[in-house]
Image: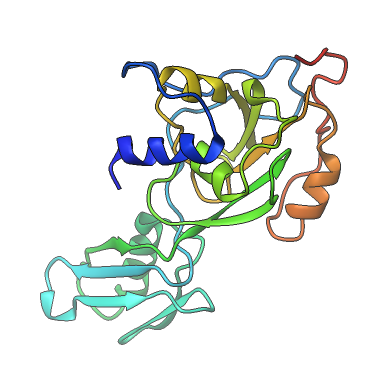
Amino acid sequence: MAVTTRRALLLGLLAAPALSACTDYALRPRPAPNAPAGFASWNQQPPEYRLQPGDDIEIKFEYVSERNDRQIVGPDGRIVMPLVGVVTAEGRSVTQLARELEQRYAPQMRDPRITVILRATSGFKVFVGGDVGQPGAVTLTGRVGAMEAIVLAGGFRDTARLSEVVLIRRGPDNRPMLRTLDMRAFLSYGAMDVPLMPYDIVYVPRSAIGEVNLWIDQFINQVLPFNRGFSYTINRNRPGY
């Protein structure tokens, strides 16, 4: 679906005013005021995609093309390769899987050089909670933004604070990073939506950002391993608007 059409659909669903003239204004994550300790500094570079069950991958041997293969990652997260048997793919990047296959094939082949290409994904989960119609896990396919995920989770409630939506993402070192998004910029100025990554957490607060422990317990911990070594209380004393 074209970007313009998708934005128009989102605005219609949210009953928001029509967009003004197109601009190059970007809806970028911004630092969260009074963010709790324990979050890593935000890294704008998206983390490398990790394979999951149902992903379609192509495995190419540089010097032995007859061994090229096409695999679907199984429900158990593994693939089965000739000569080397079962190999775990889930949770690995395509680069990591290629290096693992090279190590596994090294006793069988001279100088195995392997490339793994992701041909199609099975979709991925993000978690949307707070002041939305249907909080919980949302399955996405392709390049989907924060606003689209919120719409899929039932849209904003009337009491939602659009100016300070929380985005939590695992960083390159697997530590969580936290930023806030001003979704009013998307609705009012035609800002570009923020693309989400697998297992991102989008939390929509009410009049002010407060305790999110309860929501994390209900919708995240049972599905996504999450480090509880820091407080999730942010902006407790900041007045809402």
Question: Total of numbered circles in the picture?
Answer: 0
Q: Residue at the location (81% across, 37% down)? A: 212
Q: Nearest the camera: 93 or 179? A: 179
Where the C terminus falls, by quadrant?
top right
Q: Nearest the camera: 103 or 232? A: 232
* Up/down of 94 relative to 89, above or below: above
Q: Where in the figure is residue 146, as x and y percent of width and height? A: 52, 38
Q: Residue at the location (46% across, 42% down)? A: 47
Q: Residue at the location (88% across, 15% down)? A: 237
Q: Where in the figure is residue 117, as x and y percent of width and height? A: 27, 61
Q: Where in the figure is residue 19, as x and y percent of width and height? A: 41, 22
Left or right: residue 43 compared with residue 38:
left
Left or right: residue 238 compared with residue 181:
right
Left or right: residue 21 compared with residue 166:
left
Q: Residue at the location (32% across, 16% down)? A: 21
Q: Nearest the camera: 93 or 126? A: 126
